[in-house]
Amino acid sequence: MIKRLAIQFFGHSRSFVKTFESLRKNILEPNKATGWEIDIFIHTWDEKQSNNQRDYSEKEKLSTADIDLIKKLYSPKKLLVEPQIKINGHLHHIVENIEIPKSRIHNTYYTMHKTNKLRREYENKNVKYDFVIATRMDIDFCHPILIDNLREKRIEQISPRPEEKSSELFTAIYFGTMPGFPFISRNTTGVIRLGASDCIMCGAGKLFDESQDVYLHLDEMLDKYGFENHEYFIKHWWDDIGINVIVLNYIFGLDWSINRSLVGQHKRNWWKKLWQKK
C-alpha cells in the first residue's frame, strides 16, 4: 500500500538554500526509505525577510533566480509567491507588553492557511495524503523525523480530547528564554511547549486542516482572546476545535534549529552548549 506524505512550507523563504540539505538528509530520504511518497507545497512572500523587530537582516526581494532555485531544489507540486498583506493598526502583545503591527499577525496565519489550501486543492484533484508536515524554509532539521515512528517521540499530550487519534496534531518543542518567561527547563510542561507550533507541525485528516485555518477566524479569535503570544493564541484555536496536541521529543537546539543569520548561529551554539550541561 502506498503511503503519501505532503510537506507544506509557509512563510518567508529566508535561508532556503542553506536548509535544504538538512531537509533532504533528515526528512526526505529517511521517509522515502520506509516507503513514503513525498510531495511538496510552498506558499511564500515576494521578499526573503519580513520588516519587523524579530528579523536579523534587511529586507531582500525574492528574485526570479531565487524562485527558479526553489523550484529546482524543492520540486514543489504547487508554489505561490505573494506580497505581504498590508493592514493598518497595531495589537497589544500581552506577554511582551508591547504593541505589534496587525499585519504581522495576519500574515503569519494567512501563509499557514494558504499553503494548506494549496495542498488541499491539489489533493482534491489528484491524490489523498496520509500525513502532512507543515514547516518553514528557515528550519534546519538536525536529526530525522520518521513518520512511522512518530508516536515513539511523544512526551506529553496537551488535549481536551484524551486519546482520540483521529484528531491528533504533533508539534516539536521550543525551549528558551522566551519573552515574558523565565528560563524554561527540559521538564517544562503545558502550553509553553508550543513555541514551535509555527515551526514544525504534523498530522492528518480534517482536523489537521482545520488546525491551519485560524486565519479564517482571526478577527473573531482576537476579539475573544486578545493576543497573549503565538503559542497561547494558537492553543486557544486548537482547544476550540478539539485538537489533541502531542508534544514530541524533538527539541530546538538539539534536533532542529532556525537558520537565519550569524546571530541565529550564535543562538544555536548557545543552546547546544546549554543542553550538554543538563
Image (spheres, rainbow, N blue to C red):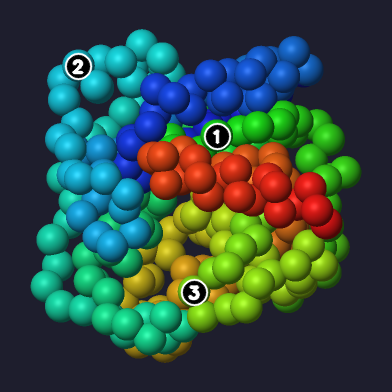
Q: Earlier in the sequence, mark 3 or mark 2?
A: 2
Q: Secondary structure at mark 1?
A: strand
Q: Residue at x 65, y 37 (%)?
A: 131
Screen quadrant of the C terminus: bottom right
Q: Is residue 63 left or right of residue 56?
A: left
Mark seen at residue 179: 3
- SS at mark 2? helix
Q: Residue furthest right?
A: 152
The picture quadrant where one finds residue 157 is bottom right
- Type of residue at label 2? Ala
The mark tally for this picture is 3
Dots 3 and 2: beta carbons under 8 Å?
A: no
Report which residue position mark 1 lands on: 140
Q: Amino acid at mark 1?
A: Asp
Q: CA distance from mark 3 to mark 1?
A: 23 Å
Question: Dot 2 corresponds to which residue?
Answer: 65
Quadrant hosting residue 190: bottom right
Helix or strand or loop: what does disc 3 sit on? loop
